[in-house]
Amino acid sequence: MKKFGLFMLIICMSITGWTQKRYVDSLFSKIDKETFTYKDSLQLDVYSASKDNNMGRPLILVVHGGAFMGGSREGLGEIKFSRIMAAKGYLVASIDYRLTLQGKSFGCDCPADQKIETFRAATDDILDALYYLSNSKFAYDRSKIILLGSSAGAEAVLNTAFLQQHFAFDDLWEKPITISGVISLAGAMVDADYITKENAIPTLLVHGMKDPLVPYATAAHHYCNIGTKGYIILSGARTIADKLRLCETSYLLAYAPHGNHDWSWLGYKYSDMIAEFIDEAVLENKLIQTEIDIENLAH
């Protein structure tokens, strides 16, 4: 298992100094933000360093959390993270998507088929946002798209990245979109068995091991009992990491042994870790397979 060199890199930088590197370090101070309607009444915010038209820069698409009933692209965590990553040289788009469960429950009383339909609608909106951006004025590498999501948004990006062949999602891919990396903050997917060597891509997973809502490994969503309307098995960070290891694909599993669902927003604070993983695993195509106790790192 190849060790991930992020933390030694940080130590070396602090001791010896380091030439700043695009996509890893903060290079730009002025960040522009523009808002667009990409579908019906759904909007997205694009963050870009002022006057930066680098055709080779990756796109990071940010998908907020909120149990598919709340949340916004304008959340404080989403805004701060988007600005930080734009300052490193990325093009960043933070999107709203249909809140199909607004005013409803996403717990054990929400029928399983409605949960699947909710996941499907979010993937549909993510793809429409990507289609919109692919035809926009913005300069970026269309083959370097990284999806990042928090909580419900993490579920949405994982399903979008890996469930192209799933019966509930396979008709959504009308146009070619290349997704080259995924960042999941306290997320899970419908079925990790759909991850194969053919579709596996570098993935960073942040998850609390005691998350009471989204399973860390493989378990029922919200830990619903068998027989309840909302009983549906999901594959969390631990299971996804195991699949990626077998597929010989890069992953970083940042686990919190005592952590709960708070890591869905705490994960935004680790923008340097995220940027380093993208740079090494996605842009430089290095094989990174490692796991870290992020609680120890935080202290």
Image (cartoon, rainbow, N blue to C red):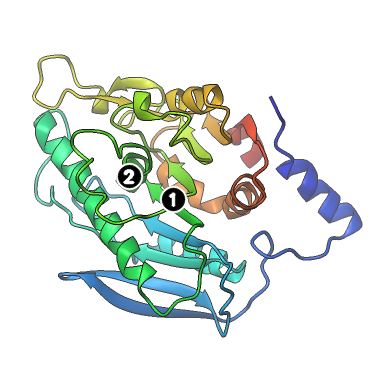
Amino acid under disc 2: Thr
Find residue 77 and report its horizontal and vertical position in percent: 43, 59
Q: Is residue 117 left or right of residue 296?
A: left
Q: In the rendered structure, which disc, 2 or 1, sits on the residue that comes first in sequence?
A: 2
What quarter of the picture does the N terminus occupy? top right
Q: Is residue 110 visible?
A: no
In this view, the residue in front, 170 or 233, is: 170
Q: Which residue is mark 1?
A: 179
Residue positioned 14% across, 41% down in the render: 117
Q: Secondary structure at mark 1?
A: loop
Say above or below: 204 vs 244: below
Q: Which residue is mark 2?
A: 160
Tag shown at residue 69: none
Q: Is residue 196 visible?
A: yes
Residue positioned 13% across, 29% down in the render: 112
Q: Residue furthest right?
A: 16
Q: Residue furthest bottom?
A: 51
Q: Is residue 69 left or right of residue 96?
A: left
The residue carrying pointer 1 sits among few (fewer than 14), some (14 to 19) or many (20 or more) residues within 10 Å by Cα, namely many
In this view, the residue in front, 278 or 217, is: 278
In this view, the residue in front, 242 or 201, is: 201
Say above or below: 87 vs 120: below
Q: Secondary structure at mark 2?
A: helix
Amino acid under disc 1: Ile
In this view, the residue in front, 277 or 124, is: 124
Contact flag, marks 2 and 1 (Cβ < 8 Å): yes
Find residue 139 and report its horizontal and vertical position in percent: 50, 75
Q: Give the CA separation, mark 2 to mark 1.
A: 9 Å
Q: Is residue 179 left or right of residue 23?
A: left
Find residue 63 and report its horizontal and vertical position in percent: 35, 55
